Image (spheres, rainbow, N blue to C red):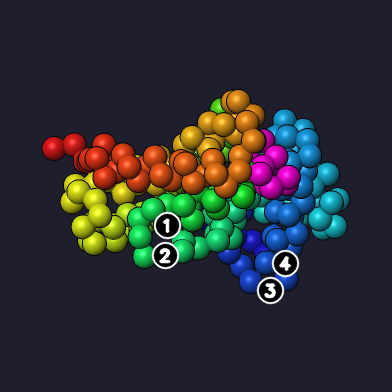
Amino acid sequence: MEYEGADPGTVRPGGRTARVRAAVLRAAGDAMAERGFAHLDLADIARRAEVGKTTVYRRWGSVTGLVADLLTDMAEQSLPRTENGSLLDDLKANARLVQRTLTDPRQGALFKAVIAAATSDARTAEALHRFYETRVEEWAPCVQQAVGRGELPEDTDPHEVIRAVSAPLYYRFLTTGDHLDEATADRAAEAAAAAARAGVYARPA
């Protein structure tokens, strides 16, 4: 099947083609977690996915096209936002989701590989930015609801609050290598909530 006019890997077909996409993206994620971006090879990924090389080359065209689609799929498959009735509980749920993702052996290695690739590949960087913005947009309503309940100043920027929750977790993950546990995740959420209540994340006047 041809997808004229679409970027490689951006069409969302059903049936057998959807199964092929799932198999290839799973293989790409495994390969990236094991070997990193620099060693990705479309022929190897086709072999792992047990599909024809021609199919992979025709659909994704390049390693960067495949990684971009992988990030899109990761955003689509991420667990949905939970609502717990208070700002702090919602932010803790967000922080613990990030913590579980980064400490998962496969997912953690995959994120490191993607982030490393994004520093030198513009298309991967763009796809990574879309991934994070999708997740921020998913969780921003819990901050908007807290504003509505009177927990936060009316001019609070919901996106900045959500970014503030995950930022210290990614910093530890990528720099210090310190262990990420639920207590660390909860502290990140508590710090973001306290700063938001104090008006730190108010939109510029």
Quarter of the figure that contains the N terminus: bottom right
Tell me the element at label 3. Answer: helix
- Nearer-N-terminus badge (1/4): 4
Give the image location of residue 52, x and y in percent. Answer: 82, 56
Helix, strand or loop for the magenta stretch, by majority: helix
* Amino acid at the residue labelled 4: Arg
Q: Is residue 67 left or right of residue 139?
A: right
Spatial distance from mark 2 to mark 1, Cα to Cα? 6 Å
* Amino acid at the residue labelled 3: Gly
- Which mark is drawn over residue 89? 1
In contact (CB < 8 Å): disc 1 and disc 3: no
Give the residue pinned by disc 2.
84
- Nearer-N-terminus badge (2/3): 3
For disc 4, the neighbor class at 10 Å (few under 14, some 14 to 19, many from 20) is few
Residue drawn where x is 42% and y is 52% of the image: 91
Residue 127 visible in the shown view: no
Q: Nearer the viewer, mark 2 or mark 3?
A: 2
Tell me the element at label 2. Answer: loop
- Nearer the observer, 109 or 72: 109
For disc 2, the neighbor class at 10 Å (few under 14, some 14 to 19, many from 20) is few
In contact (CB < 8 Å): disc 2 and disc 3: no
Give the residue pinned by disc 3.
15
* Amino acid at the residue labelled 1: Asp
Give the image location of residue 15, x and y in percent. Answer: 68, 74
Q: Is residue 94 above or below residue 200?
A: below
Spatial distance from mark 2 to mark 3, Cα to Cα? 37 Å
